[in-house]
Amino acid sequence: MPRISMPSAIRRVVSWMRRVDGTVQRIESENAELRSELAALSHEVNGLTNGLTALTDLTRATSREVDETRRVAMNTARRLTSTRGRIRMVFLVHNAAAWGSIAELVRLTHAHPDFEPVVVSIPHHYSGVGPAKGEGRTHRFLKSEGVTHIRLHKSHLSDAAQLLRALDPDIVVRQSQWDADIDEAFSAESLAWTRVILIPYETMNTTENVPIGDPPINSAVDTAMHRTAWLVFLANEEALAIARRDALTAGLQFRAVGHPKLDYVRETEPDWPLSRPDGTHRRRVLWSAHHSILTGWNDFGMFAQTHSDMLAWARDAPETEFVFMHHPLLPDTIAREGSPVSPAEYREWLNEWTELDNAAVWDGDYAEALAAADFLVTDGPSMMIEGQMLSVPTVFLERADHIPFNDIGREIARGVHRVESVQEARQTVLSIEESGADPLAARQEKNVARFFGEPGAAARILEVIRAEVDAERIVLSSVR
């Protein structure tokens, strides 16, 4: 066997390594090309999958739109040839606390031969927070008021649209403009096939609302609900002027007729949850807390700054009875991230509050407690109006950073005692009591007369509805 010199062996090894390295590089290059081709193929497959998914979604959406269009067409055709003698009005009720805005209209339609009212209790999720709830409470309230109604339990929300179609309403009345508060089946878009009426739960808007959306809108007069509505009823001409200025429709569907809540509140029987064994009357303070305790909405809520001081006041004043009530959204706001009061702190505070002999929590009709109160202490921009309707001396706990009042709000605020702390509120209550009369009583009376007008707003609303329906029937009869 021939011997190979060391240099020759080294050259052979180097040559072999170069060939191996070249082979490895070719393999790596081919692998890279293969990976690139696989990536491109994967991208194409993903594109096809996404395309198929999008096509499936589009097909389903188109099918739903076709079905809805067919249902709308059938409803329209049925109306054009309908011989139904009465106008069927469906009232969707999700907020028992706002019942006063529509209660009288429900009663009047029951008594009117041309109308057929149907009340439906539905769940809510205020601001879209949490699961649907509250229908049971609304049902119990309506039952206590003797209102016959249909129940839509939260477990049957998937049947909401079917229920509405089965009821086949000529008119649907909603309690608020906020679509997020209720199921999608009752949203402005979902109700576009019928005539929708909005009677705002608040008597009037008193603030320069925070613009929402892009482009921004005035949520007091120009949400999707306002734009879809057949009719929107307002309390006064000042509010109508705002709608004409800020609404997309320039206020075409808005009517200024007064607000039914004025009559409702004034006719409510007083009810107070506290009493003394000897039947003597103690000073009564109703404390109402707004929900806007965070920053970035209207920022009126003072509960975080005042709840400890209110508890201390109640402890220090056994001769005074205190009843706490809150905006329906306050507990949900407390449960949100960033709340200045935690749910645990709120529960602990409630326990301490209710342990006092002279303190209670009210969860019934707010008008009953308000009618029984000697004083109202509130941070709510709407509640400061409510006390004036009953000539209740009203102390307004004012947060420094709240959004500005509008022209209406500035006048309404002249009827309340504006303070910055519980200590000031306490001194104001004692001062009014010592003087024997509220020095702002005359201003309150002027505010109510100016911004609500004469009693009987619900009857005026019914007259407008009747006239609008008659006008539509005249048009329809002329084109048949």
Image (cartoon, rainbow, N blue to C red):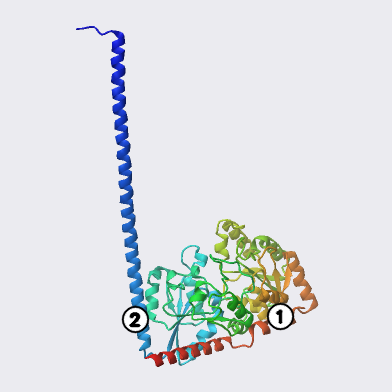
- Nearest the viewer among 334 and 199 is 199
Left or right relative to 454: residue 19: left
Q: Nearer the viewer, residue 344 or 248?
A: 248
Quadrant of residue 90 in the image?
Answer: bottom left
Q: Amino acid at mark 1?
A: Gln
The image quadrant where one finds the C terminus is bottom left
Horizontal and vertical percent position of residue 388:
68, 79
Query: Label 2 belongs to which residue?
Result: 74
Type of the residue with mark 2 = Met
The furthest residue to the right: 435
Q: Is residue 417 left or right of residue 323?
A: right
Helix, strand or loop at mark 2: helix
- List x then y, in percent, for residue 188: 46, 73
Looking at the rendering, in which quadrant would you find the N terminus?
top left
> Does residue 428 show up?
yes
Pointer 2 or 1: first along the chain: 2
